[in-house]
Amino acid sequence: MPIGPARMPLMDHLGELRRRLTIVIVSIIIATVFMYFATPVLVDILKDPIMPFLPKGTDLYIMSSLGGFAIKFGLAVKVAAVMCTPMIVWQILGFFLPALKPNERKWVVPTVLIATALFFAGAIFCYFFIVPAAFEWMINETSTIAAALPDLENYLNIEMLLMIGFGVAFELPLIVFYLAVFHIVPYASFRAAWRYIYVIMLVVSASITPDASPVTLMFMYAVMLSLYEVALFITRFVVLARDGKEGLTTSRLGLFFDDEDDEE
């Protein structure tokens, strides 16, 4: 990846940003064209975890004459954006790379690889574990008051949003790790503010789950809490090994935390 100078005029920075955005948009457009012709296979794959919970003999329906095209195009765009995730992350890091110190630039390639792996791990986890549980609950709730006439577009949109939401949620360990390792937010402050962070994660979990069901909310919250604690566990060892005990409280913002109880 070419690295530009750290100091450039404002218009040069804007030009660099425009160039990278153009690469992202053109890549997504090209991927969308290819994905559009693969949508019949993609639809079958996405329907697979939902079908066992539909009423016997029921299939997913399209409710409008243009519904087929809308579903295929919308699905192609979403899948194209997901497939282009590594390149998107690469372009974002490439834009900010000149501002990093040489010893910090070595983190770029591992960051791209780990961020991509975490995103797809979250999406796959959602597909195999969250989607079946979520749709089983939603369809059962519907069947208690009315006959379900499942709309393909609605169901696929919810499933894709769930998978993207869990993919994004799985990036949490990477964010926490870098904030602490680069001393932007000290490890000790993460520990000291755990009550607030837990509440914030609950609010975020409720906000990014599109089906508004308690099943997906609790799954998302449990996943985010687990990932957060794992990230802090790994971060503590890395910071102690590199900077010693003082690194747990040091901040680039000049903040220090002296509460011994928070460093356990």
Image: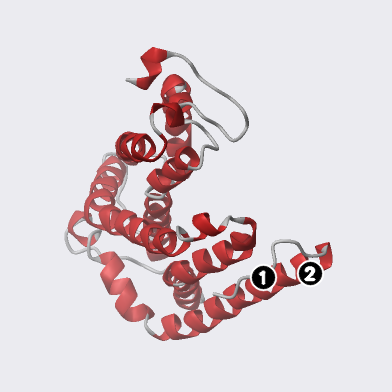
Determine whether the residue tagged by mark 2 lies in a helix, strand or loop: helix
- Classify residue 213 by image quadrant: top left
User: Dot 1: few (<14), some (14–19), or many (≥20) neighbours within 10 Å?
Assistant: some
State yes or no: discs 2 and 1 in contact (Cβ < 8 Å): yes
Q: Measured along the vertical axis of the image, is residue 211 above or below residue 60?
A: above
Q: Measured along the vertical axis of the image, is residue 116 above or below residue 37?
A: above
Give residue 232's position: percent from left, percent from top. 35, 35
- Using the image as rendered, state which of residue 52 and residue 194 is in the foreground: 194
Give residue 251's position: percent from left, percent from top. 55, 32
Please tell me whether mark 2 or mark 1 is closer to you in this view. 1
Numbered circle sitting on residue 4: 1
| For residue 101, side relative to residue 136 (left or right) | right
Residue 205 visible: yes
- Residue with the mark numbered 2: 12
- Using the image as rendered, state which of residue 232 and residue 210 is in the foreground: 232
At x 44% / y 36%, what residue is drawn? 206
- Type of amino acid at the residue the image marks with label 2: Asp
| For residue 7, side relative to residue 64 (left or right) | right
User: Dot 2: few (<14), some (14–19), or many (≥20) neighbours within 10 Å?
Assistant: few
